[in-house]
Image (cartoon, grey):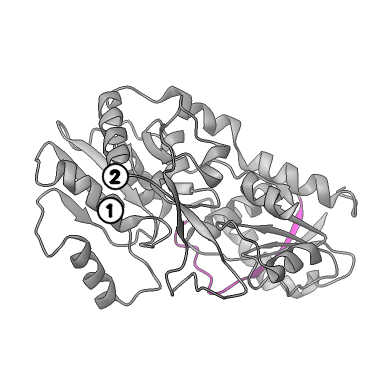
């Protein structure tokens, strides 16, 4: 089947989702044209040369896929998805808030189908739930990294929604300057200027110096991210107040790490008391940060979920007790939730309108 995929091709989360879906489509023998959203950056993907050549050809020949006889799969936020390349468009989107606006609903309803990566979003919009999968390029390294130290990790761009500042401050309250513990943070926000990012970090630390926390630059290659996830014992990324899936926390859990996860939004689609340390929400907090979420905007309105610091510290203590034990229930997610399943959901709907042969 000929199919046009309009999606970001880069090292960010949406880029990773797009890459894995495109790879799965190629693996099935489909004829894929690729219309990149934004700048193209394939540095993250150290994969076989044949696949990279297919992707490059798909991009270079994308105009040949502009046809009413070719389905278009768009991988993007609702904001910006009102436009389409072909007559029939199927949207895979990611929604983190809880109060869909009329415009967001209209954009969703204007698609031939809208898939959402979380069941809570699909319920809100009446779309189709399309769970994401484990990236098969991530693997256990079986290396020893920081011997005798319990190593925590935090990933994802610094953001109000993700509770980045509060997670760091809760960790410092419990473990700051204790040499038996380390927190490594991959929280650079690419939308911030470097000087603003530095000021933000300094503010979070209260101007104090801590010997056991480090802030790493953005890792461009997935092999580097794989090393990071293997190096940590406990992931804290799952404490985000709202997610469309939460790839870092999910991938860490699939690799057998212990993740501390807020039991809300998309986390409920893969995190359980058996494969994670769950923290129950304490309530909700307005989503507005005047950067990504602006009150009164036609997009991204409502609230995120909150948590109590004492509950998070208790959860970190529970995770500590599990260090040294492989999270076998987490590892099972890697086989249960795959991009093969993701593409199955998408193609099962497209097949109602087009012949997949």
Residue 83 is at least partly visible in this image: yes
Q: Nearer the viewer, residue 202 or 313?
A: 313
The quarter of the picture where residue 111 lies is bottom right
User: Does the magenta segment cover residue 280?
Assistant: no
Residue at numbered disc 2: 309
Q: Which badge, 2 or 1, is on the more N-terminal residue?
A: 1
Q: Main secondary structure of the magenta part?
A: loop
In the rendered structure, the answer to whether residue 38 lies left or right of residue 159 reads right
Q: Who's the residue at 24% across and 47% down the image?
A: 170
Percent position of residue 281, x then y: 44, 42
The relative height of residue 143 versus residue 292 in the rendered view (above or below) is above
Question: Which quadrant: the N terminus?
Answer: bottom right
Secondary element under disc 1, as helix, strand or loop, is: strand
The quarter of the picture where residue 275 lies is top left
The quarter of the picture where residue 321 lies is top left
* Crowd around label 1: few <14 · some 14–19 · many ≥20 (10 Å): many
Residue at numbered disc 1: 185
Spatial distance from mark 2 to mark 1, Cα to Cα?
A: 19 Å
In the rendered structure, the answer to whether residue 140 lies left or right of residue 247 reads left
User: Does the magenta segment cover residue 42?
Assistant: yes
Instruction: Identify the magenta region.
Output: 30-44
Percent position of residue 53, x then y: 60, 61
View extreme (front): residue: 283
Secondary element under disc 2, as helix, strand or loop, is: helix
């Amino acid at each position: 089947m000929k199919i046009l995929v309009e999606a970001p091709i880069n090292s960010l989360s949406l880029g990773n989702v797009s890459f894995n879906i495109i790879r799965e489509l190629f693996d099935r023998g489909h004829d894929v044209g690729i219309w990149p959203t934004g700048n193209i950056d394939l540095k993250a993907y150290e994969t076989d040369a044949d696949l990279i050549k297919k992707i490059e050809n798909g991009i270079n020949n994308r105009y040949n896929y502009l046809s009413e006889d070719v389905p278009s799969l768009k991988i993007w936020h609702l904001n910006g998805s009102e436009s389409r390349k072909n007559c029939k468009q199927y949207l895979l989107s990611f929604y983190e808030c809880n109060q869909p606006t009329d415009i967001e609903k209209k954009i969703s309803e204007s698609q031939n189908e809208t898939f959402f990566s979380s069941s809570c979003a699909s319920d809100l919009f009446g779309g189709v739930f399309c769970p994401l999968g484990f990236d098969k390029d991530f693997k256990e390294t079986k290396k020893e990294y920081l011997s005798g130290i319990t190593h925590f990790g935090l990933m994802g761009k610094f953001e109000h929604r993700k509770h980045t500042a509060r997670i760091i401050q809760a960790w410092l309250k419990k473990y700051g300057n204790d040499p038996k513990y380390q927190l490594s943070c991959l929280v650079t926000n690419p939308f911030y200027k470097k000087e603003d990012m530095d000021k933000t970090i300094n503010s979070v630390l209260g101007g104090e110096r801590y010997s056991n926390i480090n802030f790493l630059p953005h890792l461009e290659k997935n092999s580097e991210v794989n090393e990071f996830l293997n190096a940590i014992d406990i992931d804290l990324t799952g404490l985000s107040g709202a997610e469309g899936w939460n790839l870092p926390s999910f991938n860490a859990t699939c690799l057998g790490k212990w993740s501390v996860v807020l039991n809300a939004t998309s986390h409920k689609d893969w995190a359980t008391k058996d494969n994670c340390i769950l923290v129950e929400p304490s309530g909700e907090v307005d989503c507005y940060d005047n950067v990504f979420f602006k009150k009164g905007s036609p997009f991204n309105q409502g609230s995120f979920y909150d948590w109590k610091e004492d509950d998070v510290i208790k959860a970190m203590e529970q995770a500590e007790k599990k260090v040294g034990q492989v999270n076998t229930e987490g590892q099972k997610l890697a086989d249960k939730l795959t991009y093969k399943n993701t593409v199955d959901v998408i193609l099962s709907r497209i097949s109602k309108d087009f012949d997949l042969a």
